[in-house]
Image (spheres, coloured by chain):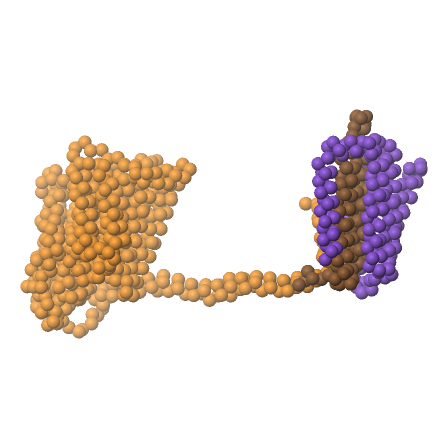
Chain colours: A purple, B orange, C brown
Amino acid sequence: MGTTEVIFWFLTAVAVFSALMMVFSKNPVHSVLWLILVFFTISGHYLLMNAQFLFIVNLIVYAGAIMVLFLFVIMLMNMEGDSEPRKNQWMTLAGIISGGTLMLVLVAALKDTGTQRQLVQMKEGQIGLIHHLGMVLFKDYVVPFEISSVLFLSAMVGAVIIGKK
Amino acid sequence: MMKLIYWVPLLPLLGFLVNGMGRRKLSKSAVSLIGCGTVLVSFLISILIFLEVKAPGFQAHPFELFPFIRAGNLNISFSFLVDQLSVLFLLIITGVGTLIHIYSTAYMKEEEGPHYARYFAYLNLFVFSMLLLVLGSNYVVMFMGWEGVGLCSYLLIGYWFKNGEYNDAAKKAFIMNRIGDLGFLLAIFWMIGQYGSVNFSDVFSRAPETSLTVVTGITLLLFIGATGKSAQIPLYTWLPDAMAGPTPVSALIHAATMVTAGIYMIARSNILFTLAPLSQHVVAVVGLVTALFAATIALKQNDIKKVLAYSTVSQLGYMFLGLGVGAYTGAVFHVMTHAFFKALLFLGAGSVIHAMHHEQDIRNMGGLRRYLPVTHLTFLIGCLAIAGIPPFSGFFSKDEILAAALVKSPLYYVFGVIGALMTAFYMFRLYALTFRGKFRGTHDQEHHLKESPSAMTVPLIVLAILAAVSGFLGVPEIFAPDAHWLHHFLSPIFEDSMQIAGPSMEMGHGTELALMFGVVAAIALVIVWAWRTYSRYEKSDAAETGLGKVLQDKWYVDEIYDAVVSRPLKSLSIFLDDVVERSGIDGIVNGVGRVVQYGSRQFRLLQSGQVGSYILIMVIATVLFFILQLFWKF
Amino acid sequence: MPVNYYIFLSAALFCIGIMGVLTRRNAIVIFMCVELMLNAVNLLLVAFSKMHHLRALATDAQTTVGTDAQLFVFFIMVVAAAEVSVGLAIIVMMYRNIHSVDVNFLNRLKH
């Protein structure tokens, strides 16, 4: 088992574990912290696949900006500690069972598909580099890119209006 | 001249539209003028066309107005066919129609303005439909006219629609006709399926190539249609009830023209019938049975119009007998003479009823010859004509049919003669009860008795002349060789049939002459008997007994139909209404509603408003879809 | 590295997200679970991108197959960022109105 495999399995285990912890921790602040850890591991996967641009964007946008925003909101509301009194155990059980069933179904459906033997290029490859993606983004995808700036603007305006009421 | 053919049916249609739409505005005289004028002009045009058809070298060919139905290979055009047969009917319809229109102006004088206009509008519409029927060059156009006359008959029988009984009579006529029409319609469908065309020329030219079964089936279906329209057993019961309409209507529709539509149809399809001997036998037997059956009923009827109605049914039976034995010319000849003398008799009856202030029971009449001289004389001529006394027209036409029947089978002949004797008896019973003896009505009626106005008597006189002399159009061979004008005139229509049927057996002139004189003598004896018996008739309250009662009650046919057809149908509908409709269909409908209501009440619990439960359901549904899509082996 | 490892990892993360959405009632945590699901999909997109790139390299050394997928991931992040800003604003407003972020109180849909 080479270094790549070791790193892969390590990142995978941490990701699944932190995701579970995120879901099941009672304190929302802990959930946020566990989720940041999940994002870090996913970024690690990106780096492992040599998708450097997405690696850094994921870190900055998700782990940085978005999660800080979450943390900020939680703290603003001042609701550390368990804010959810356990009332309906059946609902929880039903949620876990149906989520698990979906997992089972997906795995069962995908394990025999033709793509399973396909390999993923690891540690190398040019397409994930900032240089290459920048060229494509500002040549072929310049219009969607600009439109997304309008989307941001409208989201900003929306957030301000909703928050002002 | 032939181009004018469009105007023949178009004018009555215009008259119908003008009178129908302007019935509240137009004055009575304007209505009469339009009503009579349009038919009169049609008659004049018909005469011109007749002259052209009569001219040597005439070739019949259809006039197409416009394409009517186009579907796949089927191509039905709205076209007219003018030939010897249709032009003869044109003359009868428009000629008798004109006289009856004129007669109606006096007879219907007491009606209010709008109703008066309605009457003439219906009458014009009837003439239009009838002309369409005889002019159509294919069965579909004929069927349109066929339905049109049925509708007009319904409208005119129920003309006095405030009387419930009259409405019932109208409905009865319409429904009985519908039963027959279904047969006609099926025959048309069969023709389309078999020949791919409904044109007379196509059907007749292709018919000899098809199997006997098909031709027999088609002709029997056509004959069912004819029994409905021409009041033959088993669909004849509507015609006596149809006397509920105004008397001129009875004369026009239920004696002279519409009821002969069935004869026309079979005469038109003569080739088909000649190809199917079985159908011919059926036609002959049904015609003969009807002729006898209706004659027996007529013996004991006391309503002046009912007697004439049953006599019409009986005479129509003779025409079918003629068609059945292959004497197409004779049948058409009888249609023509019958149109004259039966219209005359009905109009005479109308005149009597008019004078008697709507009294129709002949037991309350008598001795009217003193008060109504013109009516009396013309009525007598009509009676002589229908009874078959030479030289009046009925003798020639009936003799021709009977002679053809004798050639086919002596049995037909014997029963035909019995029917003719009965005809003579009931007609002169009617005549004697009405015009002979002494007056048996109330003094009030006697006081008001007077001859009808000239608008009524002139048509009577014209028809009486026609009834007296029209027989000379068909003088039989034995009196003068080659004198049968009608036979020559119609020979292009029937020559194909004559070829198919082959030369008929000729009987010796001596035999024919002897039989003829024997029959005439017997008829004369019967007439004298009836005349003497009923001239001395005294009103008595004694009810009829035995056979007389059965005859008076029309063999209880209406009652039998009621018990066999109407009542079971009615109880079936009641059963369907009570059981199937209420608990079956309503139960299903209400049950669906109740299930939906119950189900929605249960499903409503799912709508908890909790977003979590919605998402849960969504996930479960997604899982199910995955399972179905990926693992369900179809 | 076979691609089905990534597929199963993504499926696992996605299903954990779903479980979170179904079991938790805190609106913010639910929102975070949605973000987790979004990231699981992103990861799979990148994995597929690299897989197709590797296959294309076998025939053409200069190929750029797979670029589009990575740009899609980028746009998904952009949209997610916008979505988070609006979503958090809504949650803040909800908290301001009912002094709770428990979605069970949000049963107005019933009425």
Q: Residue at x 30, y 63 (%)?
A: B168
Quadrant occupied by the C terminus of chain B: top right
Is residue B11 shown above or below B58? Answer: below
Place of residue A126 in the rendered image (x, y in percent of width and height, measured from the top left): 83, 31
- Looking at the image, the residue that sits furthest to the front is A164
Q: Is residue B530 visible?
A: no
Relative depth, front residue between B513 and B68: B68
* Quadrant of res A143: top right
Relative depth, front residue between C4 and C68: C68
Relative depth, front residue between C33 and B392: C33
Quadrant occupied by the N terminus of chain B: top left
Q: Residue at x 31, y 50 (%)?
A: B147
Q: Residue at x 80, y 45 (%)?
A: C39
Is residue C107 shown above or below B621? Answer: below
Q: Residue at x 82, y 48 (%)?
A: A66
Place of residue B67 in the rendered image (x, y in percent of width and height, measured from the top left): 34, 38
- Looking at the image, the residue that sits furthest to the bottom is B541
Place of residue A132 in the rendered image (x, y in percent of width and height, measured from the top left): 80, 31
